[in-house]
Image (spheres, grey):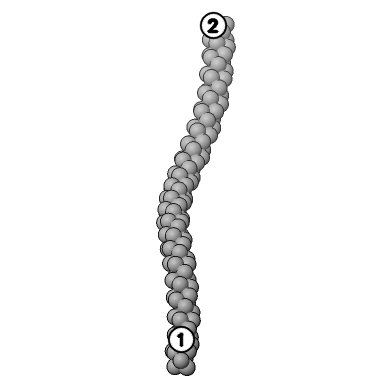
Amino acid sequence: ESNMEEMRSELEGQAATINQSESEMAEMRCDIETRAVAMEQSEAEMEDMRSKLGTQRTALNRSESNMEEMRSKLETQAAELKQSEAEMEAMKSSLKSSDKTNSKVENMRCNMETQAVALEQSESNMEEM
């Protein structure tokens, strides 16, 4: 009976050890599952961030492309403006030249009128003689 009591005590000790081990394993399993869920959450957040970064990169590339297009248009407009300014300068020069020509023509007309008056005066003087 003493052996049986000893065996019972030994079996109860082993059962307690098994129960303790099972409890520890259950805690470890719970801890591992919690970490797995946290890792999946982190992976999902990282994938979300990766997606957002991709979207931002696309928007940035589009903005850069738009800015480059605007820069090109502005450069074209600047070149057209310089061309217009050059044409206006040429027109001003032409007008000045035209004004000089008009002034010369006016002087010639005045001289011719003066000569005509002088000629008439001369003719009149000759007639009187």
Front one among 45 and 128: 128
Q: Which mark is drawn over residue 3?
A: 2
Occupied quadrant, residue 20 = top right
Report the residue at 47% width, 78% height from top: 111
Q: Secondary structure at mark 2?
A: helix
Report the residue at 55% width, 22% height from top: 24
Q: Are marks 1 and 2 in contact (CB under 8 Å)?
A: no
Total label count? 2
- Relative height, residue 10 to residue 83 (above, below): above
Camera sees residue 84? no
Front one among 61 and 124: 124
Q: Position of residue 117 (x, y in %)?
A: 48, 86
Between marks 1 and 2 in the image, the one whose residue lies nearer the viewer:
1
The residue labelled by disc 1 is: 122
- Going by the numbered disc 2, the residue's amino acid type is Asn
Q: Secondary structure at mark 1?
A: helix
Q: Quadrant of the N terminus?
A: top right
- Relative height, residue 64 to residue 23 (above, below): below
Q: Which mark is drawn over residue 76?
A: none
